[in-house]
Image (cartoon, rainbow, N blue to C red):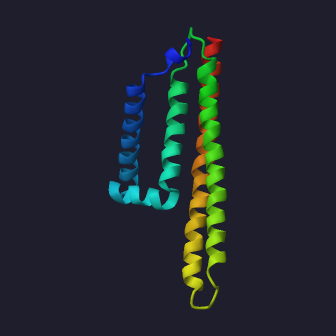
């Protein structure tokens, strides 16, 4: 129970989640020179809402757990929670990669392949494959970075 007290309250966690999301959207909008609405539409088209929401929740959980590791406390629960959230991101990324490939192949198998339909079918196929590979490109490095950060933070603080 001691480790649970180290986590922020529910209202603080929700505020942190949404506040971080808004700041990240603003930074992404600035860097890409895209209005926020266009950026949100792009996120939905490339990743899907389910991936964005689950990824954001797991990412926030890992960051909160890692940041809550403090000297003089029993940090094992926070360390494990951070690592499990980071591992969840890699599992999520690979799951959506397989989903995108499956959807693409399903799209290909549902339509007759004729010279006049090839361009439309390839367009739909590449849209599904884009989701498949972008979830991996974002998810796996994020997961690795979070795992490394949580592990190094835990090791550093426990050695002090």
**Left or right: where 70 falls relative to 83:** left
Q: Residue furthest front?
A: 110
From the viewer's side, name the closer residue of 50 and 85.
Answer: 50
Q: Quadrant of the C terminus?
A: top right
From the viewer's side, name the closer residue of 55 and 137.
Answer: 55
**Where on the picture, by quarter, is residue 118?**
bottom right
**Left or right: where 153 falls relative to 50:** right
Q: Residue furthest top?
A: 72
The number of numbered discs placed on residues in the rendered structure image is: 0
What residue appears at the point 39 percent right and 26 percent down from the top-left corner? 12
**Left or right: where 153 falls relative to 49:** right
Q: Residue 38: x percent and y percent?
A: 36, 60
What residue appears at the point 47 percent right and 62 percent down from the top-left corner? 45
Q: Residue 58: x percent and y percent?
A: 54, 38
In the picture shown, does residue 72 fall above or below 33? above
Q: Residue 123: x percent and y percent?
A: 55, 76
In the picture shown, does residue 82 fall above or below 7? below
In the picture shown, does residue 107 fall above or below 30? below
From the viewer's side, name the closer residue of 119 and 53.
Answer: 53
What residue appears at the point 41 percent right and 43 percent down from the top-left corner? 24
Q: Quadrant of the N terminus?
A: top right
Q: Residue 143: x percent and y percent?
A: 61, 40
What residue appears at the point 64 percent right and 32 percent down from the top-left corner? 84
């Amino acid at each position: 129970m001691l480790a649970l007290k180290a986590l922020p309250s529910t209202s603080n966690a929700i505020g942190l989640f949404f506040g971080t999301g808004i700041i990240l959207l603003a930074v992404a909008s600035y860097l890409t020179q895209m209005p926020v609405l266009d950026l949100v539409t792009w996120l939905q088209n490339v990743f899907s809402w389910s991936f964005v929401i689950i990824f954001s929740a797991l990412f926030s959980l890992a960051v909160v757990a890692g940041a809550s590791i403090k000297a003089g406390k029993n940090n094992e629960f926070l360390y494990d929670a951070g690592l499990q959230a980071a591992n969840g991101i890699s599992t999520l990324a690979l799951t959506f990669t397989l989903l995108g490939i499956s959807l693409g192949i399903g799209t290909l198998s549902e339509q007759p392949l004729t010279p006049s339909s090839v361009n439309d079918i390839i367009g739909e196929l590449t849209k599904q494959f884009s989701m498949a590979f972008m979830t991996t490109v974002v998810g796996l490095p994020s997961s690795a970075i979070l795992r490394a950060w949580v592990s190094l933070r835990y090791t550093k603080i426990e050695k002090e």
